[in-house]
Image (cartoon, helix red, strand yellow):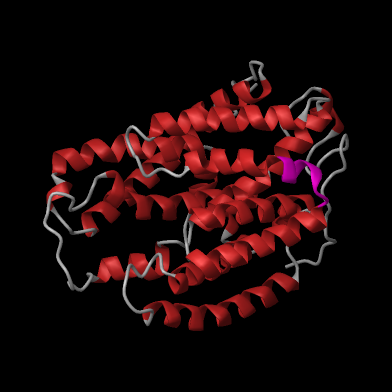
């Protein structure tokens, strides 16, 4: 890994580290941070592995069984996947709020109006998606985003980061993993973007390796505490939530470190298309697996293994389709619609 200077967020009216003057002058989208797209695709994979059971209502027609030991696959989901990926997605959503606000300033538009419209459109998409998957998370993202909008726009980045740390820590300590984590994670993500973290992740220095070691050491007692937490669902207790948050940080560190090696190309090939079309893939996956669940009668089964294989096949197919789509178009279909309504203008879709 090479040592690079820490980047700061562009001031209002200036360019992001990966945008040229020509791009800004023509209102073209800034060049993307590839590592963020890879991370977003990675988070999307974990989220589907967790959500698919709820989407297809696994075992809902079976009587409740008290004291039954979870299968090996369920145990792996509980301690390696559940509550580990949603924090990544929420944090990156907070980052996107800073990106959009900066872009609005460059376009001489009102950041508040643009972000409010963007979040309002997301709420409509989420309400439509909830008809297929009632447990979907985008409704909470849209509502919480509107709640913290003023803070993201007005607070200096240092105060934004401090408030995000406090809100996140308190939410995990009080309620474990859940929707209460979202406001703090949004604020942390917005502050991280303002401090230039996305550019740093493209070419991290040795500090990331040191941070990874520290987080890995913290993961061991956190997971042990989750394993020994008495009663309840091991995913959503206080110890389980804290373990999930710490492991989310560890996963991010490991993926970014991998992107600093020769693994970056295969990771980008698989995950970047998912990350660039994450909204379309998130909603589309529900539309695909829900009918499969009906045909397979998964409401009458508790076996998660077929679901996991189905999720992996769906994700692979989405990655291939997204890559083919992006070879001709700038954005995913839902991303393009969302972008047009955000900026209240028809954005170019076809690649030139």
| Rendering quarter of residue 318 | top left
Which residue is painted at 62% across and 30% down in the image?
A: 118
* Farthest-out residue, top: 346
Question: 345 or 256: which is nearer to us?
Answer: 345
Based on the displayed image, in which of its 4 quarters is residue 226 positioned? Answer: bottom left
Give the magenta part as a residue range.
150-156
Q: How many marks?
A: 0
- Quadrant location of the N terminus? bottom right
Residue 189 in the image, given as x and y percentages of width and height: 67, 53
Q: Tell me the quarter of the image containing the C terminus.
A: top right
- Can residue 257 be seen at all in this image of the molecule? yes
Q: Is residue 159 above or below residue 13?
A: below
**Magenta: main secondary structure:** helix
| Residue 329 visible, this angle | no
Q: Is residue 22 left or right of residue 259?
A: right
- Comparing 245 with 350, the one in front is 245
Q: Is residue 180 above or below residue 71?
A: above
Q: State the residue at coordinates (81%, 58%).
A: 158
Residues 241 and 322: in front is: 241
Residue 168 is one of the magenta-drawn residues: no
Q: 31 or 59: which is nearer to us?
A: 59
| Horizontal relation, residue 236 to residue 326: left or right | left
Residue 123 pos. (x, y %): 51, 32
Residue 17 in percent (x, y) is at 81, 45
């Amino acid at each position: 890994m090479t040592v690079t200077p820490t980047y700061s967020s562009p001031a209002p009216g200036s360019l992001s580290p990966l945008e040229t003057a020509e791009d800004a002058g023509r209102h073209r989208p800034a060049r993307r941070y590839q590592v963020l797209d890879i991370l977003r695709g990675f988070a999307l994979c974990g989220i589907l592995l967790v959500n698919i059971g709820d989407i297809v209502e696994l075992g809902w027609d079976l009587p409740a069984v008290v004291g039954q030991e979870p299968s090996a696959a369920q145990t792996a989901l509980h301690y390696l996947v559940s509550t580990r990926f949603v924090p990544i997605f929420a944090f990156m959503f907070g980052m996107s709020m800073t990106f959009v606000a900066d872009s609005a300033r460059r376009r001489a538009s009102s950041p508040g109006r643009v972000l409010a419209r963007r979040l309002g459109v997301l709420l409509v998409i989420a309400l439509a998606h909830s008809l297929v998957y009632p447990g979907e998370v985008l409704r909470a993202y849209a509502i919480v985003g509107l709640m913290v909008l003023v803070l993201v726009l007005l607070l200096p980045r240092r105060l934004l980061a401090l408030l995000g740390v406090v809100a996140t820590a308190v939410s995990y300590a009080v309620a474990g993993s859940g929707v209460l984590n979202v406001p703090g994670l949004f604020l942390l993500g917005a502050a991280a973007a303002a401090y230039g973290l996305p550019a740093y992740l493209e070419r991290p220095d040795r500090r990331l390796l040191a941070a990874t070691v520290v987080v890995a050491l913290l993961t061991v007692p956190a997971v042990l505490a989750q394993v020994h937490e008495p009663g309840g669902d091991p995913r959503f207790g206080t110890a389980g939530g804290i373990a999930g948050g710490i492991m989310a940080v560890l996963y991010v560190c490991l993926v970014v470190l991998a992107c600093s090696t020769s693994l970056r190309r295969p990771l980008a090939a698989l995950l970047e298309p998912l990350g660039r079309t994450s909204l379309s893939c998130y909603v589309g996956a529900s539309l695909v697996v829900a009918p499969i669940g009906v045909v397979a009668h998964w409401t009458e089964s508790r076996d998660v293994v077929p679901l996991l294989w189905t999720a992996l096949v769906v994700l692979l197919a989405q990655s291939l389709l997204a890559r083919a789509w992006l070879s001709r178009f700038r954005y995913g279909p839902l991303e393009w619609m969302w972008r047009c309504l955000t900026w209240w203008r028809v954005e170019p879709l076809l690649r030139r």
